[in-house]
Amino acid sequence: MISHIIAAASFGIIPVLYKSLLLIDIDSLTILILTKLIIVFFCFSLLLYGENYKTVKNDIIKITKSNDKCFHATILFITAAFVYFYGQYNYILLFKDTETNISTIIIACYPVITILLSYYYFNETINIYQFIGILLIFTGLALITNKVK
């Protein structure tokens, strides 16, 4: 549960930090590149902590033992990196022209995409509560976008 709270807090803090950087006239691309370079440093630090290096090494060995698994994993990693990079760039970019509170509410609709993709790719069921949640999200979006206009 504490991880959920930390994740929620970080998702709440990041837009304010990005908007603050934009307000001191730092370009979106610069923000993206510098923050990701710092993240790379943290990732290397994490790799050196405890048994993490062995875990990563063992996973890479497992992946590379099978050509099919290696190709599939490579495509997934490249796709994830592209989607993440493109999404993060646009995430930073949108704070230039939109109120932070409106932007974050619209972006917070990502669970709808996750639910629908999970239904399609993993044959997960959509229960009545999720369906009602999706309807409420779209209703909220309609109300917000009317305010924006």
Image (cartoon, rainbow, N blue to C red):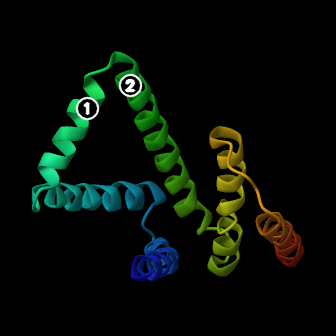
User: What amino acid does circle 2 point to?
Assistant: Lys
Q: Is residue 99 above or below residue 38?
A: below
Residue at horizontal 86%, vertical 67%?
135
User: What amino acid does circle 1 point to?
Assistant: Lys
- Measured as percent of width and height from the top left, residue 50 is found at 9, 61
Disc assigned to residue 12 = none
Whether label 1 touches label 2, CB < 8 Å = yes
Kindly identify which residue carries mark 1. 62
Quarter-wise, where is residue 74 in the image? top left
Q: Which of 80/71 is in front? A: 71
Q: Earlier in the sequence, mark 1 or mark 2?
A: 1
Q: Which of 112/123 is in front? A: 123
- Measured as percent of width and height from the top left, residue 32 is found at 41, 57
Residue at horizontal 45%, vertical 28%?
75
Placement of the C terminus among the 4 image quadrants: bottom right
- Measured as percent of width and height from the top left, residue 16 is found at 50, 80
Quarter-wise, where is residue 3 in the image? bottom left
- Measured as percent of width and height from the top left, residue 95 is found at 59, 69
Label 1 SS: helix
Q: Is residue 39 left or right of residue 18?
A: left
Q: Is residue 143 above or below residue 107?
A: below
Label 2 SS: helix
Q: Is residue 120 above or below residue 6?
A: above
Q: Is residue 65 left or right of residue 22?
A: left
Q: Is residue 94 left or right of residue 15?
A: right
Residue at horizontal 21%, vertical 45%?
56
Kindly identify which residue carries mark 2. 69
Q: Which of 20/75 is in front? A: 75
